[in-house]
Amino acid sequence: MAARESILDEIRRCRDRGSVLPGSVYRDPEIFEAEIEALFRPGWMGVACGQNVPEPGDLFPVQIAGHALLLTRDREGEVRVFYNLCRHRGALLASEPCRAQGGRIVCPYHGWSFGLDGRFESAPHFDRTDAAAGPSDADRADLGLIPLRSTVWRDIVFVNLSGDAPPFDAFIAPLEERVRPWTAAELRDLSSVEYEIEANWKLAAENFLDAYHLPIAHPEIGGGFSGALLLEDLEISGDIVGLAMPQGYGPGSGQLESPLPRFSGLGEERQHLEAFVILPNTLLIVEPDIQQVIVLRPRSPGFTEETLASYVVSDASQRKDLASERAELHQSVLLVNDQDAALLAGLQQSRSMDVGGRTRPSPSWDETILRFQRAWANRLLGRPLRAT
């Protein structure tokens, strides 16, 4: 109990701007369970992207916050989220991304089937006869898949496990206003890739907000420190923190020379780049000609599954003569993420040590990261660790 109180005291000091997070919060199983309860289950969290189910009939299973979920895209093109649970005996309906054969989700255990909208459709010999009779209409209505409260914003699929979070529109409104110039209606799918990151999810979020590392760890981006030196710290709300680089990556980065279409709301020459963490686990970056999304799905203190989705701008980006530019952009996104994945695996080993709490962030560079840590601490302390 004394050790637990010591960890909580360190977290309180971080919240009150007296220190950084202790190393234990990146490795401790009890902290991990507490943050799942405090940050993931009560509010809105990202689970994947619409790009993960691009066509009607596509299925995409995810594991997050101790729950198995299943994304579908129905015949009308709507993305839906259900518990990955057959209503008969609770079997997992899908364990890998796949397509629903014949437009039906079929349980591999006993063959019960469901529509892409979750409605019960049929079950072999439901009443133990050879007749084709099934349940009554009243029973059918209670045998469908169990939906979750969900919504799609800028192609990111958000869910609320508890069912009682404030309306999503109110939650996201400050960020919606901020990114309005990067018009959501202009987004077009580029690529979606799944990653396994051998690091705590918070380290991945902090790395996303770290502009200081870009010229060192990702020199192929170009521009050196010229863009990062103009860094602006942003606090959009208590749950959304971010940064802005008004000149993007700066001269030499190639942003001005890119032939890919740009968001119309930015104007022709604007290089503005902004990156945000939407607590707990959704990372968004908008640039003049691309949007990137990372959804973090923590599975343990030191292991995180990740969806990395990229988007280009407008129908004009799909021209055949821009195919090589789209491919090059996709490869550059993968390169940067591969580099970060390797850095994070090493960071997990070092930053999670107790001595990791003695690191000294730079006041000139790391305020955005500290804002994220304080927001995490504030949410965690709202639901303290259980007494034993």
Image: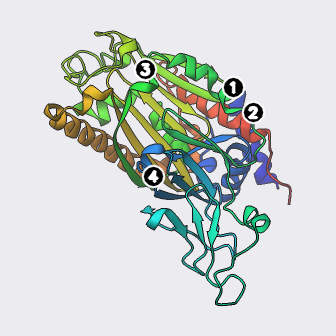
Q: Nearer the viewer, residue 292 or 216?
A: 292
Task: Name the spot of residue 380 as percent of width and height, x first.
Answer: 73, 41
Disc 1 residue type? Ala
Q: In the structure shown, which secondary structural element does the residue marked by tag 3 occupy?
A: loop
The residue beneath circle 3 is 182
Please determine whether, in this image, residue 125 is positioned above or below residue 62.
below
The residue beneath circle 2 is 166
Q: Nearer the viewer, residue 356 or 305?
A: 305
Foreground label between 3 and 4 = 4
Distance Cα–Cα, label 1 vs label 2: 7 Å
Distance Cα–Cα, label 1 vs label 3: 19 Å
Assess whether mark 2 and mark 1 are in contact (beta carbons under 8 angstroms): yes
Using a 10 Å C-alpha cutoff, classify the residue at mark 1 as few (fewer than 14 neighbours), some (14 to 19) or many (20 or more). few
Q: Residue at x 69, y 58 (%)?
A: 146
Compare marks 3 and 4 and give the one earlier in the sequence. 4
The residue beneath circle 1 is 170
Compared across the picture, whether 176 is left or right of 169 comes to left
Task: Name the spot of residue 2 as percent of width and height, x first.
Answer: 81, 53
State which quarter of the image contains the C terminus.
bottom right
Distance Cα–Cα, label 3 vs label 4: 27 Å
The residue beneath circle 4 is 56
Compare marks 1 and 3 and give the one earlier in the sequence. 1
Disc 4 residue type? Pro
Disc 2 residue type? Pro
Assess whether mark 4 and mark 2 are in contact (beta carbons under 8 angstroms): no
Q: In the structure shown, which secondary structural element does the residue marked by tag 4 occupy?
A: loop
Q: In the structure shown, which secondary structural element does the residue marked by tag 2 occupy?
A: loop
